[in-house]
């Protein structure tokens, strides 16, 4: 049953890409917008956590929190800042690749190769699916490689 669901989900994704066979402009714009919003979201995470870090330092200097508490807060805020900064770098690289139309065309072609999928096999899963999350008996989420940003 899970295989049928995943096969059906892949066919749905492919059918949603069929109108893009000739023109990838719509997809490129959508992916660029998604990537840019993710960059902006991570920049906001850095700003917010820098603010929290500054506030924690002020509270430490004022004697409102102990050195151990400050160090704990500092470690957490710095960790979130570092993660967000790493994400920004990765997302900016992905965003730059989206300005290369051959890259986007390659993504679409990779999905359209399986336009007539009749059964699920390891090759199809490895090529197209990033992860499958089963949260309960009624909810399955299929995350596709490359095109997860279009959902």
Image (spheres, rainbow, N blue to C red):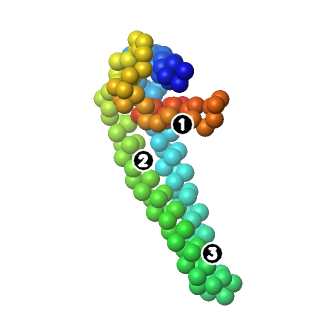
The crowding category of the residue bearing disc 1, from other C-alpha atoms within 10 Å (few below 14, some 14 to 19, many at least 20), is few
Q: Contact (CB < 8 A) between labels 3 and 2?
A: no
Q: Which image quarter holds the C terminus?
A: top right
Residue underneath mark 3 = 55
Vertical order, 105 against 68 (above or below): above
The crowd level at tag 3 (other Cα within 10 Å; few <14, some 14-19, many 20+) is: few
* Residue tagged 1: 133
Q: Find the distance from the CA under tag 3 to the CA under tag 2.
A: 29 Å
Tell me how far mark 2 sits from mark 1, CA to CA.
Answer: 23 Å
Q: Earlier in the sequence, mark 2 or mark 1?
A: 2
- Please report whichever mark, 3 or 1, sits nearer to the chain's N-terminal start: 3
Residue 145 visible in the picture: yes
Helix, strand or loop under label 1: strand
Please report contact status of discs 2 and 1: CB closer than 8 Å, yes or no: no
Mark 2 crowd level (few <14, some 14–19, many ≥20, 10 Å Cα)? some
Residue at 55% of width from left, 63% of height from top?
47
The front one of 103 and 111 is 111
Going 61% across and 79% down the picture, which residue do you hit? 69
The residue depicted at 37 percent of the width and 31 percent of the height is 126
Q: Residue at x 42, y 47 (%)?
A: 91
**Quadrant that contains the N terminus:** top right
- Left or right side of 58 for 109: left
Q: Which residue is mark 2?
A: 91
Q: Is residue 50 above or below residue 9?
A: below
Query: Does the residue at mark 3 contact the one at mark 1 (Cβ under 8 Å)?
Result: no
**Is 135 or 36 nearer to us in this picture?**
135
Local secondary structure at mark 3 = helix
Residue 24 rendering spot, x and y as whole percentages? 41, 24
């Amino acid at each position: 049953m899970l295989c049928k669901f995943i096969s059906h989900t892949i066919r749905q994704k492919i059918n949603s890409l069929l109108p893009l066979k000739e023109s990838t402009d719509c997809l490129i714009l959508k992916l660029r917008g998604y990537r840019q919003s993710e960059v902006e979201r991570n920049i906001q995470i850095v700003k917010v956590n820098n603010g929290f870090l500054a506030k924690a330092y002020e509270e430490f200097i004022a004697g409102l929190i102990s050195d151990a508490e400050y160090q704990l807060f500092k470690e957490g805020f710095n960790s979130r800042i570092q993660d967000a900064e790493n994400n920004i770098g990765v997302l900016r690289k992905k965003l730059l690749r989206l300005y290369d139309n051959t890259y986007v065309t390659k993504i679409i072609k990779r999905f359209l190769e399986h336009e007539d999928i009749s059964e699920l096999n390891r090759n199809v899963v490895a090529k197209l699916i990033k992860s499958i999350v089963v949260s309960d008996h009624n909810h399955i989420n299929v995350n596709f490689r490359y095109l997860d940003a279009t959902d």
